[in-house]
Amino acid sequence: MPSIPPATMQALQLSAYHGQAADLQLMTLPVPQPGPGEVLIRIAATPINPSDLMFLRGEYGIQKPLPIVPGIEGSGVVVAAGRGLLSQRLLGQRVACVAPAAGDGTWAEYMLAPATHCFPLAKNLSLAVGATLIVNPITAWALLDRARRHRHRAIIQTAAASQVGRMVVRLGRRFKLPTINVVRRAEQVEMLRLLGAEYVLNSSLPTFDADLRRAAAQLGATLAFDAVAGPMTGQLLSAMPPGSQVLIYGGLSGAACTIPADRVLFERKSVAGFWLNDWIRRRGPIEMVRLSAQIQRLVRSDLAATIQARVPLSAAAQGLALYQQQMSAGKVLFVPNNELV
């Protein structure tokens, strides 16, 4: 049986959308009580994602009233449940979870969420693995699913050394879909080659534009997944054949996209956005439960995430700094209840 939750909890609370660690304070807050269709999760682990950094800056697609507890995804144990068949069935279960659209997030000892925001974990998966089960794996799966549905012969991706990028490489190999992988540093080129990536381009080299055009033409790459945005979007669009599309799913550069008008006007090229929240919403809870089971079967292979550090909530500033300094080294997990996961 799940333990009885205490009256109060420790949580990281955001006071301003400035993107500064000083805007986060460790607070003692009341533990919320679940209503109908809701569950209370004792959070075991919760990662820092690029989308979390956007949220801290007020640049994410959802901006909640302040003060607010951040954190988009995590894992834990359901310790209390409100009325409802699904919420009651989750009581006592280990779950991966996502934060509600209008409430506090996962960077806390406890989080209240709709039961439909929880996915039971397979017995062979740890809570650490479960903490990163949703945002990155489902993003990679959704991107590859789009490429396959529209029968693209090859794809280009930026930020290929990221967690999502590595997952796209492995899924591309599984589905025999060639990937042209763009990174920024020589060591990242070597890392992806060891992962099995055949086409890896270093955007810091003076030959990058020519290399990108050559690879896109050789493979017939007509779809690009862009996590960087800024000038890179225009470079991708210019390099690909007529009728191609760049799909933006991140903004790591922090710069506005630059798009050559003639490519759009005369070569039928386009730019679109991908937001995981919208993609999940369109599928509904039943399809997402099925997808979660499929993701969990691949999470130790094609969809495996690397974890570089586990830190308590009290070391939030250090954890954020570590992740921002070396994102490609892996996820930084907050462990709110200081448990081994």
Image (cartoon, helix red, strand yellow):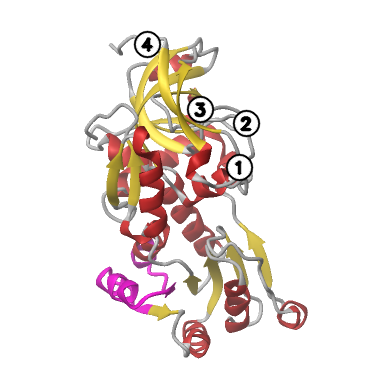
Q: Do callouts 2 and 1 mark residues in contact (Cβ within 8 Å)?
A: yes
Residue range corresponding to the magenta coloring? 171-199
Between discs 1 and 3, the one toward the N terminus: 1
Q: Nearer the viewer, mark 4 or mark 3?
A: 4
Residue found at the far front of this picture: 22
Q: Nearer the viewer, mark 3 or mark 2?
A: 2
| Residue 224 appears in the figure | yes
Q: Position of residue 158 (x, y in %)?
A: 48, 69
Reading the image, the residue beneath label 2 is: 66
Three-letter residue code for mark 4: Pro
Identified at 39% across, 66% down, the residue is 172
Three-letter residue code for mark 1: Tyr
Spatial separation of the CA atoms under disc 2 and disc 1: 9 Å
Identified at 37% across, 11% down, the residue is 6
Spatial separation of the CA atoms under disc 1 and disc 3: 28 Å
Task: Pick the quarter of the image with the N terminus.
Answer: top left
Q: Do callouts 1 and 3 mark residues in contact (Cβ within 8 Å)?
A: no
Helix, strand or loop at label 2? It is loop
Q: Position of residue 62 (x, y in %)?
A: 63, 40
Between discs 4 and 1, the one toward the N terminus: 4
Label 2 CA crowd tier, 10 Å (few <14, some 14–19, many 20+): few
Spatial separation of the CA atoms under disc 4 and disc 1: 30 Å
Three-letter residue code for mark 3: Thr
Reading the image, the residue beneath label 3 is: 116
Q: Nearer the viewer, mark 1 or mark 3?
A: 1
Asked whether 160 falls inside the magenta stretch, the response is no
Reading the image, the residue beneath label 4 is: 6
Q: Position of residue 45 (x, y in %)?
A: 34, 35
